[in-house]
Amino acid sequence: TTTYIPTQAPDGVAFPETTAEVQDIVRACAAHRVPVIAFGVGSSLEGHTNAPGGGISVDTSRMNRILAVNPQDLDCTVEPGVTREDLNRHLRDTGLFFPIDPGANASLGGMAATRASGTNAVRYGTMRENVLSLTAVMADGETVTTGKRAKKSSAGYDLTRLLVGSEGTLGIITSLTLKLQGIPQAISGGVCPFPSVEAACNAVIATIQMGIPVARIELVNALQMRAMKNYSKLDYPESPCLFVEFHGSDAGVAEQAETFGMIAEENGGGPFLWTSVAEERTKLWKARHDAYWSSLTLRPGAKGLSTDVCVPISRFAECVMETEADIAEMGLIAPIVGHAGDG
């Protein structure tokens, strides 16, 4: 496991296949005051799936059916055990895709429960913006369905947003309706080196404030870039870099890439090396998602400890600069990588 939090095992594991079976499990546990812990695929790093008080782990991996796809309405309904990659494979022939990409092949129920984000969040939002409705089994074994497939409603409480991010504390999600996106006509992406982390961060701030519809913009500092070059065999400068991707029409992505290149140049960065070749982009984002594993090569035999920070975009450069200074002062081996576009 990649979490630094020690495992706390449950007393037992149940593998329900239907909402009714989840209800039976929850009712039995409620009657005997036994803790219930929902489990997707266990890809999170923060110990969400631990059972500090014992109890029953409800493993949703067998609830993995795609219940409906509505291409004309740009939505689909799935069970919680369906993973992100499963869904996008299923959608391939429809011209649609589900954009939230936390890196791991997480279950969609788990992604909703933890309000997952990811590299694409700067353009498409987090799970909060992409879940239209949920069905969940509550603590007394009753089900609640939040919202409809309609895009808006002003009637009643917004229970969908309450359950998204509740991390299993309010109920166990047994189905969810998700917003889908059209696969872009064109995608371009690439890497832009900078003389300093501060310059890279300032380029991010300018890009967001100018309203350039960037799909992904990721910061990698020099130490992390060294690790990526060793581990993923990337052929880029060993300096702070931004990994960037644009989605849209052929003309649109070319214009966006050109504008970003100008912003980078104004901040002392460049050249912006971008490509529309799918294989090259895939290699780049595979390296980004493997950042954790690459960082372990910086100190063989050591374990990694990941932590997160999020600040308003205007404070982004300040935050990263202060952190780099703290790391240097303490003598830590601590590479920096992150979703820069949403702070």
Image: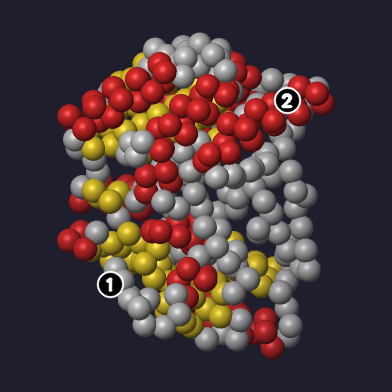
Please state if 132 lies on the left or on the right of 311 as rendered: left
The quadrant of the rendering that contains the N terminus is: top right
Residue at figure coordinates x 42%, y 43% from the top left:
122
Mark 1 near mark 2, Cβ–Cβ under 8 Å? no
Residue at figure coordinates x 69%, y 30% from the top left:
322
* Quarter residue 184 falls in: top left
Query: In this picture, is 248 found above or below 145?
Result: above
Residue 194 percent coordinates (x, y): 50, 17
* Circle on res. 150: 1
Q: Nearer the viewer, mark 1 or mark 2?
A: 2
Residue 63 percent coordinates (x, y): 45, 66
Q: Is residue 148 visible?
A: yes
Residue 312 percent coordinates (x, y): 55, 45
Please state if 98 lies on the left or on the right of 253 as rendered: right
Q: Report the front residue among 331 and 21.
A: 331
Query: In this picture, is 175 found above or below 288?
Result: below
Residue kind at label 1, given as amino acid type: Ala
Residue at figure coordinates x 70%, y 68% from the top left:
12
Residue at figure coordinates x 53%, y 21% from the top left:
199
* Quarter residue 51 falls in: bottom right
Residue kind at label 2, given as amino acid type: Ala
- Is tag 1's residue or tag 2's residue first in the polypeptide sequence? 1
- Helix or strand or loop: what does disc 1 sit on? loop
* Circle on res. 81: none
Work out how far the residue at label 1 is from the one at label 2, CA to CA, in angstroms: 49 Å
- From the image, tell me which residue sits under label 2: 325
